[in-house]
Image (cartoon, grey):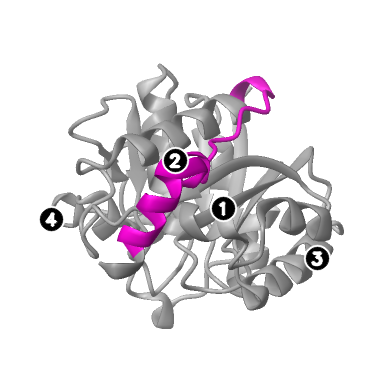
Amino acid sequence: MARKIVITSGKGGVGKTTVCARLGMKLANLGFRVVILDMDIGLNNLDVVMGIEQKINFDILDVIAGNCRLKQALVQDKKYPSLYVLASTHMYDEVYINKEDIKSVVDKLAETFDYILLDCPAGVEEGFRRAVYSANEAIVVVTPHISSVRDADKVLSILSNYDLLGKYLIINRVRGDFEATLETLGIEEIVRFLKTKLIGVVPEDDSVTKGEPAGEACSYELNRAITLLAENLHNGTKKIYDVAKKYRGFWGILRRNIKKKV
């Protein structure tokens, strides 16, 4: 039975789409059949994050309107053969897509995929409700900033009104040097406040160029964090990447001082 997971955040700018893309890639790398749906109707950017924008011939609106078969609209990832993307549409102003339309597509995909990841638009408006309606689990992505945590709390409150099998938390863009010195909200503090199962901590990666596709090379730290995240999601384990480890102790202090000067 496919796991249908909506990935949301409450607000934009937390790296939700990139996390969704990298999680999909890692699950595919572990041998699962994965499809990612861009649910940001009219403002889609998952195709850019995945580096497949030139390969899209049909989108989710074409599927719903009957302009193509579902299989024709799926774009296969060039690096991970068991990973597919169903793109959003730029034509939302011309037609209304309701939650039942989306659920019909998701249920059809569930017949052949192990994981269905729904990249939810920011906010809690119609797009949010449309995405959550088709899911049976939810992941909330948050950054260690008070505004992001407060928005995540609101989203979790709304999610409690849905019949979900599980709700999980990912803390993204965590700077290890700040975590080691408690210069931002700490990981444990965020988890206590949101009262939600933590399945991943993803470090800020200075080696990743802004705008670069998620599938491009990344640091060992980022790759390891995403690997643990995928394993926790699938196996129910609790192995969280320690982003602050290399910033502790004598050598860690040196690293923190060097990082501050860069």
Residue 36 seen by the camera: no
Q: Classify the position of the N terminus by image quarter.
A: top right
| Magenta segment includes 1 | no
Question: Which label lies toward us, 1 or 3?
Answer: 1
- What secondary structure do most residues of the magenta stretch adopt? helix
Could you tell me which secondary element the residue under label 3 belongs to?
helix
Extreme left residue here?
54
Q: Return the residue nearer the eye: 182 or 135.
A: 182
- Is label 2 or label 4 in front? 2
Q: Horizontal and vertical percent for residue 77?
A: 24, 36
Question: Nearer the N terminus, badge 1 or badge 4?
Answer: 4
Seen from the viewer's position, the closer of residues 185 and 78 is: 185
Mark toward the start of the polypeptide (1 vs 3): 3
Q: Which amino acid lies under the numbered mark 4 shown in the image of this protein?
A: Gln
Check disc 1 and report the residue beneath it.
Answer: 180
The residue labelled by disc 4 is 54
Residue segment shown in magenta: 234-259
Determine the CA span between mark 1 and mark 2.
9 Å
Location of mark 2 (residue): 246
- Give coordinates of residue 9: x percent, y percent: 60, 64
Residue 18: percent from left, percent from top: 39, 54
The amino acid marked with disc number 1 is Ala
Cα–Cα gap, marks 1 and 4: 42 Å
Q: Could you tell me which residue is drawn at 52 percent across and 25 percent down?
A: 114
Q: Is label 3 in contact with label 2 (beta carbons under 8 Å)? A: no
Marker disc for residue 124? none
Q: CA distance from mark 1 to mark 3?
A: 33 Å
